[in-house]
Amino acid sequence: LREGMMEKAIGQFKIVMELEPNHPEAHFNLGYIYFKKDMLIEAAEEYKRGVQIKPDSIKGHLSLAFIYEKEGSYDEAITQYSAVLALEPDNQNAKQAISAIKAILRIKESLKLNTKDASSYVYLGHIYFAKEMYKEAADNYNKALQIDPKNKTAKIAAEKTVVLLCEPPQK
């Protein structure tokens, strides 16, 4: 969605919610637009409202979990991914996301003990890259390179990530 179209859509969804405040899809769609505009707080609020109205919405819980994850609110993200698994026990997205969060938390804990461990930053970068969180991936690859400028893995991964960050979003 282009910026002008997003603003128009926001206005339309707000009208729908005035007329029908318990319309979960309107909240989910508005949350999605806010997410695309990088308005994570507003996006989370809309997804929360949608999930309150429709607590069995896997899409709503997954979206809210991803926003929490981007904000670094890992406990809340795990709670939402767990809600998905309660609704759909074989949901691979939720299972993989919980595993990735636990790995992130373990690596961050180890970095508290050794802040100069370049390989831990590379591993964090790889996890974020796999989750298509490219800015976070690039930040961690760059931290690894600050510690160890000769780290080939970090250098190649950082270059690849920067290219992805520079590419326009695909339609």
Image (cartoon, grey):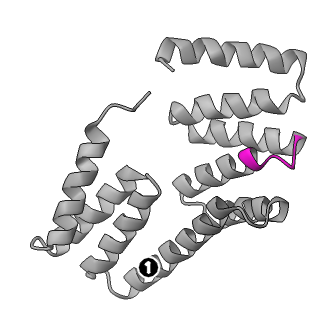
In this picture, is 138 found above or below 7? below
Q: Which one is nearer the viewer's eye here, 59 or 52?
A: 59
Q: Amino acid at mark 1?
A: Ile
Q: Position of residue 112 (x, y in %)?
A: 41, 82
Reply yes or no: does residue 57 show up in magenta.
yes
Q: Which residue is mark 1?
A: 107
Region rendered in magenta: 54-59
In this picture, is 61 found above or below 94? above
Q: How many marks?
A: 1
Q: Is residue 149 left or right of residue 91?
A: left
Q: Is residue 58 left or right of residue 3?
A: right
Q: Main secondary structure of the magenta part?
A: loop
Work out which quarter of the rendered image holds the C terminus and state it.
top left
State the residue lying farthest toward the bottom. 113
Q: Is residue 124 left or right of residue 76?
A: left
In this picture, is 129 found above or below 162? below
Q: Position of residue 121 (x, y in %)?
A: 32, 72
Q: Position of residue 124 (x, y in %)?
A: 39, 69
Secondary structure of residue under mark 1: helix
Q: Residues within 10 Å of mark 1 (few under 14, many from 20)?
A: some
Reply yes or no: does residue 23 show up in magenta.
no
Residue drawn at point x = 35 percent, y = 73 percent = 123
Residue drawn at point x = 23 percent, y = 70 percent = 144
> Which quarter of the picture shows residue 15?
top right
State the residue lying farthest toward the left. 150
Residue drawn at point x = 25 percent, y = 77 percent = 118
Q: Which one is nearer the viewer's eye here, 77 or 45?
A: 77
